[in-house]
Amino acid sequence: MSDTETTAVDPDKPERSKAAKWTRRGFIGAGALAGGALLVGVAVRSGNPVGKLKPIVAGGDGEALINSWVKIDADNIVTAIVPHCEMGQGANSTLAQMLADEMDVSWDNVRVMDAPADGNYVSQHAVRTFVGPGTIPGKPNQVSFMEPTYDGLFTQIGKLADAYITGGSSSVRSTGQNGMRVAGAAAREMLIGAAAAEWGVPADEITTQDGVLSHAGSGQSAPYAQFAAAAAEQTLPRAPRIKQASEFKLMGTPALRKDIPCKVDGTGIFGIDGGPAEGPGKDALRYAAVKAAPVVGSTVEAIDASAAKAMPGVLQILNMGDFVAVVADSYWQAQQALRSVKTTYSKTEIDGLDTEQMFAQYAAALDEAGMDGGNSKADYGDAAGALSSAAKTVEAEYKVPFLAHATMEPMNCTAWVRDGKCDIWTGTQVPLMSRKGAAEGAGVGEDDVTMHTVMLGGGFGRRLTPEYANQAARIAKATGYPIKMIWSREEDTAQDFYRPADISRFSGGLDEQGRVVGWSNIHCSEDEPAEAPLVEFYDIANVSVRGAEVEAPLRLGAWRSVGHSQHGFFVESFVDELAHAAGKDPLEFRRTLLANSPRHLAVLEGAAKMADWGSDLPEGHGRGIAIARSFNSIVAEVAEVDMTGDMPRVTKMFCCVDAGYAMNPDGLSAQMESGIIYGLSAALYNEVTIKNGAVEQSNFHDYRMMRMVDAPQIAVQIINGAPDNLGGAGEPGLPPAAPAVANAIFAASGTRIRELPIAKHFA
């Protein structure tokens, strides 16, 4: 039997257990509901707690549910149940688009539902992206055959790590490619099988389109909903056939995002909007403003709240040990009162620390590591030997600062603790971690915490930590009120989990023809992901990449594109310096280095062609180019800068991206544009500095973001270079931005920028 055929259930054959072993492609389970809805989902192993999911995901009478990813209701509406958060990237809509295409349903009939944050919707595919490699060489995202115990292992790892996660530009390339598409394909085959049995016709003669089953020979047709209940009785397909790119109808099209209308009309609920909508909690809701100790490790020793107590609307003032909270009738009242509280903090070992001292420690670590010390990240050929015998050597040192996330929506959480239970409303990239943090704060079990899913006003890695959910739950427990806690912008800036600062040193060797023969790099940051500083796509035979161990007494965390944000600037700036030393055009120099990397070369040439590389520019203007591979996507960018004013002005950015296949081209282009703007803000302006152990910046007046008036024209071109090997979208547009601009500044002025932000060189 071919993998496209589906047969009806044999009544004389014992029913197959839904917990029986499955291949990775056949992980789909099914449940039926008397009202005519089909639910298709993941049957990883026996013991799935469907009782918890049933009333949340499919609460109608007679429904049966097995960790469902997709359901069809009696009105022929298909709902994709998505285990990722929506923070502006549009990934949830794209995931539904992938499922809908495999099911052959109309986009107008598709809805998106957030999966409940109770541990049962951990995506083993997302975990696999972070933890384990793909199973087909050269196609790490291709759906492949795998024993279910392996999938179950990744699911259990995800549960242990609370890995219901949105990050690493992984949603589409993991859950979408290996989860949603398979779920949609399985549902379609089951529906076909049910119709074939009812109509008495061969399954392979039935066609599907826009949620309708048709048999041309008999003239019969019916909507999916008519066969939903019968489909659930079908034998589960062991290997549902997924479409080839040539068969896509929705995938690869700019389908309208499902999350946009509610954001336009104001009905979308963000964390800062969330809270009890009815009942006694709505009327009892109060607001909290908080201020934590400004130095890591410090605690609140004493407070003088005499002035705050006399202010209107103030209900309670709390010394929580590591932070002070004021609870009031409104957020404004709470924040104004908090500013009047005089606080004494405990002393720490880093009270006198400043940024200059920290960078001195980094430099000392690099000095100690020398030319052969540190932790090896890559070592092939003989870099030391190649450098010693090179016709010309080039050395350079680059430096980048700590960075804050500065999400549009500051950290916030609404918590309601009563009767041994806790409800929280918060925007988070890790709902299970936030649930755990709230449980600890409320003093209840994790199963006694209900997470109410809301949209995020930006994440960029900042909402990967649960401390703000913990704070809100602690305040709610201490006061007895449902509490909406909102951080001020100043608190958000001072208490971030910062992008690490770094120093990176390079040595490069060129032969007589100006070809790179040796590459040595040592830097300080802990690389996430591990490949961030590597240059394996460049044709360099002798490479050494090492890391020196340093400690940074700050809270550090993932920042959009993580290690690629630093190393994109380091690597592509140094490649430009080598090109200059070789007396070659930066584009031609890279072309030679990418001779054995055809996808990279195509992207590089795409960006160069967009920018009309080599054409004349006005006096004082320059072009710079850079390329980076991150999160399995390849992006090249060309920046044009105007150096005729007091400060470099980026006028144009040209971006060419190969993410394997653009499931939604509009979405991919938007994420490239977003990554570029975020990257330009960091490159031009952003810097977090430390004085006396505390962060000096406080708000957008001293932590500047790019404004509309300063934004360049941006053009994006998409190459679909590997449909079976998808890459990410949310982060890969950022790494080339800073080096492209720095290289353009050099082309225009001869000034080489080796330390960010650029603005500090033109103050």
Image (cartoon, rainbow, N blue to C red):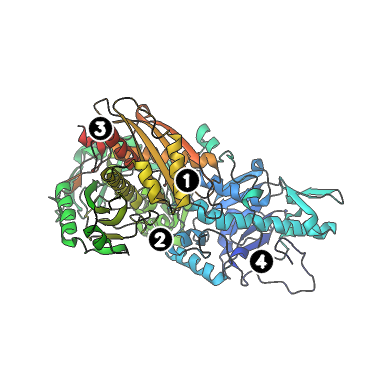
Name the spot of residue 344 as percent of width and height, x first. Answer: 16, 48
Instruction: Determine crowd level at label 3: few under 14, some 14-19, many 20+ residues with C-alpha closer than 10 A.
Output: some
Secondary element at tag 2 = loop
Residue type marked 4? Arg
- The quarter of the picture where the C terminus appears is top left
Residue at 21% across, 32% down? 762
| Residue 697 higher or lower than 358, as above or below | above
- Mark closest to the chain's N terminus, 1 or 2: 2
Picture quarter with the N terminus: bottom right
Indicate the quadrant where residue 272 lies.
top left
- What mark, if any, has residue 238 been given in the picture? 4
Location of residue 339 in the rendering, given as x and y in whole percent from the top left corner = 23, 38
Q: Can you identify the residue that label 1 sits on?
A: 602
For disc 3, the marked residue is 749
What numbered label is drawn on residue 444? 2
Instruction: Name the side, left or right, on which 638 lies relative to 36.
Output: left
